[in-house]
Image (cartoon, rainbow, N blue to C red):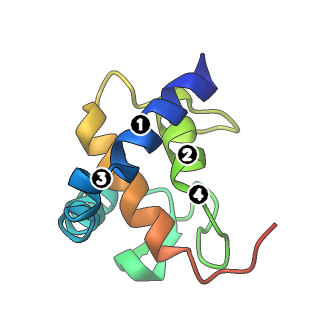
Amino acid sequence: MRLLAATLLSAALASPALAAGAPAAAGRGRTLFVAACGSCHWLAAAGTRGRRGPSLDGERRSYADVVDQVVHGGGGMPAFRASLTRRQIADIATFLARATASAPGD
């Protein structure tokens, strides 16, 4: 089920109609990341310096992986599916996938 949810959201963002809106989604995602994630996560691209969760600098995160982590939580991170809308989650995932795209792969 987790993979299905991430796949559906990923497919929706990858559609040509939504791809043109990706820069706007990334901008909204940065704002949301700062507000919802920045107190825990360090990410230079967002200007956040959280120390509770892992630093995301230097880690490549795919859109689908971010969606899965935000929706379901895990590894000490709570799930945010009840407090963020699907669009907000998609925007955060778009921003984080773009912000970490140049990081080394796993």
* Disc on the earlier residue, 4 or 3: 4
Q: Pick out the residue farthest to the right.
A: 106
Identify residue type, mark 1: Leu
* Disc on the earlier residue, 1 or 2: 1
Image coordinates for residue 41, horizontal then vertical, percent:
51, 62
Q: Is mark 4 in CB contact (under 8 Å) with mark 2?
A: yes
> CA gap, disc 1 to disc 4?
12 Å
* Disc on the earlier residue, 3 or 1: 1
> CA gap, disc 4 to disc 2?
5 Å
**Relative to 10, does residue 106 appear above or below in the rendering?**
below
| Mark 2 burial class by Cα count in 10 Å: few <14, some 14-19, many 20+ | many
What's the residue at 49%, 41% (across, down)? 67
> CA gap, disc 3 to disc 1?
11 Å
Identify residue type, mark 3: Asp
Image coordinates for residue 99, horizontal then vertical, percent:
46, 75
Of residues 12 and 32, the one nearer the viewer is 12
> CA gap, disc 4 to disc 3?
13 Å
What's the residue at 35%, 40% (across, down)? 12
Identify residue type, mark 4: Ser
Q: Which residue is mark 1?
A: 9
Q: Is mark 1 in CB contact (under 8 Å) with mark 2?
A: yes
Q: Quadrant of residue 33?
A: bottom left
What's the residue at 64%, 60% (across, down)? 54
Of residues 2 and 34, the one nearer the viewer is 2
Of residues 72 and 53, the one nearer the viewer is 72
Q: Quadrant of residue 92?
A: bottom left
> CA gap, disc 1 to disc 2?
8 Å
Looking at the rendered image, the quarter that the C terminus falls into is bottom right
Image coordinates for residue 65, horizontal then vertical, percent:
60, 47
Identify residue type, mark 2: Ala
**Relative to 79, does residue 90 appear above or below in the rendering?**
below
